[in-house]
């Protein structure tokens, strides 16, 4: 099994609903350093899992939709708690859409799975893993 | 599959028994930077894998039992070689006990598995992965 | 010259005023990983620059005043652009107050200077350095 | 499941064939920070996955065969695109040969699998995972 | 004293002349993770040392002139050993030219100094520091 | 001003004397990731601050004298508290001796200063800086 990972980041404001979140119920924010891993059983004829420039551009596009925003006001995220876990899934699902649409190239349709990790600090991070 | 990871550390003295360990047979020590990963098929109604504050507290409690000690003198570890691999298992098993006892909250009983990684330097680390 | 550094972090929301900030004029947020360095010409009789537990507690106290908040609403920061550079100075000045008040111990009054670095992502950070 | 990882690095020149590589079709180079992970169901009687000194020496030997070279001129790699993915497999396969030959000790024959990760920059890396 | 740092990277091939370089006399390569630090006595009216987007673009432009190339063939570098130290100076001097030309904005002319660090691996790096 | 840094590590046991150290008065241990920075006004005729292989060997030699030991039993360190700050100075002074003795090559006598940083965890480190 091969994988390729690209890293980017996004800076957002949000608040979380539920007593479990303590002070994070207040409006605050985060930088998420985002690692997107593309997994594939074998490399293609060029010897790659995915065109890394297209993979980086796709990730840039996804984090660009979320970054520099107050996620509490985003219609697409209405009704969900934008926890690190939940945002990892949002990023992964949006990347999966781009893979399936061909935005990462025809060969990228051979990608078997995605893992997205959002690092919220030097001491905490969350991941979401899914197949394609 | 979702996961959440929290990081802490512990500073211990110990020695290792067996010729394979070379100079590490002498009394020496280590800082272990400890990453504890909690895995779960789905998030709960709050959108989380685990209450991260409780997860961090549980990890703090486990490393607090081991840190600032000479592990050669710990009754609980008598007769075992406290290698990085073996200590990763000790930390994981003690975290698993806390999860099952409800110390991380009732929801945390849905956690499927744990991965504990102990980084002993910038060039070496070990992990232990187990189900719950 | 000796120095000791402790690391903590804070998660805040804010917006920045001025065309130079582009999309960061919108309400967004950041995790700042904060490194506070205490500099001193010589160590004390215990062989330390500063009691590291007190240094960490002082930094915790300073980031606790700022974290999990929308800095746009903080009276203490009214009228300033809370850029990474400017926040590095806020943290350094507040730490300096604590050093001078004796909160880090009497010996800490021998500290010559402070450097505070705020890492806003894996690709950008800012520092402020001052004497005491 | 236990694992142990050791880190080393290699500095190489190469070029990549195929339009997908854009400017990387020109002769350029890379530092690969190489992480080799040895996985095993249980530890041995000494409490280890593998003799870490031998594991590090084996990795050193493998990266020593590739480093400080122009990979375009290496007979062993003739006809392949030396992408990060492909090189991760080369390193993993050569480590697997050493494990099977007994170079990491007899006990190392119990190793179940290998994961090799090559970090080409702070924003991109690739892995290859295989069984033994 | 304030500073702001931005990070980028470049991937190059080169060889070094002189017995001191041992195997690095052969054609090989490196990824340099490049940190450019802009120092300034005070922030401007916007509260910044430099427009970080322009700083990042300037660094991108400088590493873009060097990356994906065999430095042995670059006319601009003819006759010099492209050591990590020497390349740190090349990057710093080219950034200084851009600062002075106004490419980072008029306010950036108040920048007092630059530090450029090139990280060639996880265990070695070099810096060059200059005034402006 | 140029500098070159090399990284190594050492794993030691020790205890600290003085109430200020709390639980660290007990026998415990640490991994110190050690960064040694060599500073010099200009590079030599080869374009280097120091022969990096010799610099790394000198650092290896210094950490080899301290590592895999209980520092409480080391005659050379008798009567001192082996705090991170104090050990940074020990490493720097021993490196300075090696520079002056010619162990890093004749050219290395032009080195102006040293900075040694010991990272004891992901959240704390200490440095000692001296001239030569």
Image: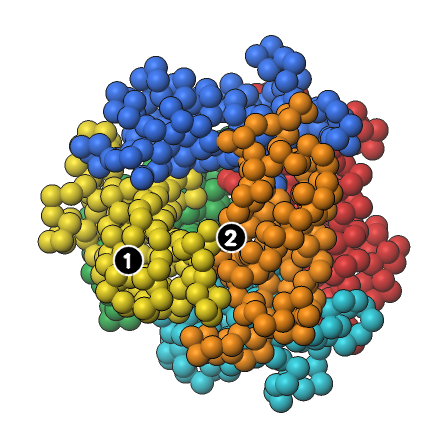
Chain colours: A yellow, B blue, C green, D orange, E cyan, F red
Q: Are marks 2 and 1 on the same chain?
A: no
Q: Chain of mark 2?
A: D
Q: Residues within 10 Å of mark 2 (few under 14, many from 20)?
A: many
Who is closer to the viewer here, C20 or A16?
Answer: A16
Q: Chain of mark 1?
A: A
Q: Give the residue at x 80% y 39%.
A: F65
Who is closer to the viewer here, E48 or D120?
Answer: D120
Numbered-mark total: 2
State the quadrant of the C terminus of chain D. Answer: top right
Residue C112 in view, yes or no? no
The percent position of residue A53, horizontal first and vertical second, equals 39, 69
The percent position of residue B6, horizontal first and vertical second, equals 41, 35
SS state under label 1: helix
Q: Give the residue at x 64% y 85%.
A: E73
Who is closer to the viewer here, E19 or E27?
Answer: E27
The residue that mark 2 highlights is D128
Q: Is residue F14 left or right of residue C110?
A: right
Residue B86 in view, yes or no? yes
Who is closer to the viewer here, D116 or B106?
Answer: D116
Q: Give the residue at x 66% y 82%.
A: E72
- Foreground mark, 2 or 1, reads 2
Q: Give the residue at x 44% y 28%.
A: B130
For the residues labelled 2 and 1, the Cα–Cα distance comes to 22 Å
Q: Pick out the residue farthest to the top.
A: B75
**Could you tell me if the residues under marks 2 and 1 are in contact, i.e. CB atoms within 8 Å?**
no
Whether D121 is drawn above or below A1: the answer is: below
The residue that mark 1 highlights is A95
Q: Residues within 10 Å of mark 1 (few under 14, many from 20)?
A: many
């Amino acid at each position: 099994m091969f994988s390729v990972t690209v890293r980017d980041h996004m800076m957002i404001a949000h608040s979380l609903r539920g007593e479990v979140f303590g002070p994070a119920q207040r409006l605050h924010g985060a930088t998420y350093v985002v690692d997107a891993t593309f997994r594939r059983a074998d490399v293609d004829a060029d010897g790659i899992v995915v065109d890394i420039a297209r993979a980086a551009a796709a990730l840039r596009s996804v984090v660009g939709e979320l970054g520099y925003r107050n996620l509490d006001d985003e219609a697409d995220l209405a009704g969900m708690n934008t926890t690190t876990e939940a945002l990892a899934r949002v990023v992964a699902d949006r990347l999966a859409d781009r893979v399936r649409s061909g935005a990462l190239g025809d060969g990228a349709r051979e990608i078997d799975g995605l893992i997205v990790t959002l690092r919220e600090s030097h001491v905490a991070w969350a991941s979401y893993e899914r197949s394609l």
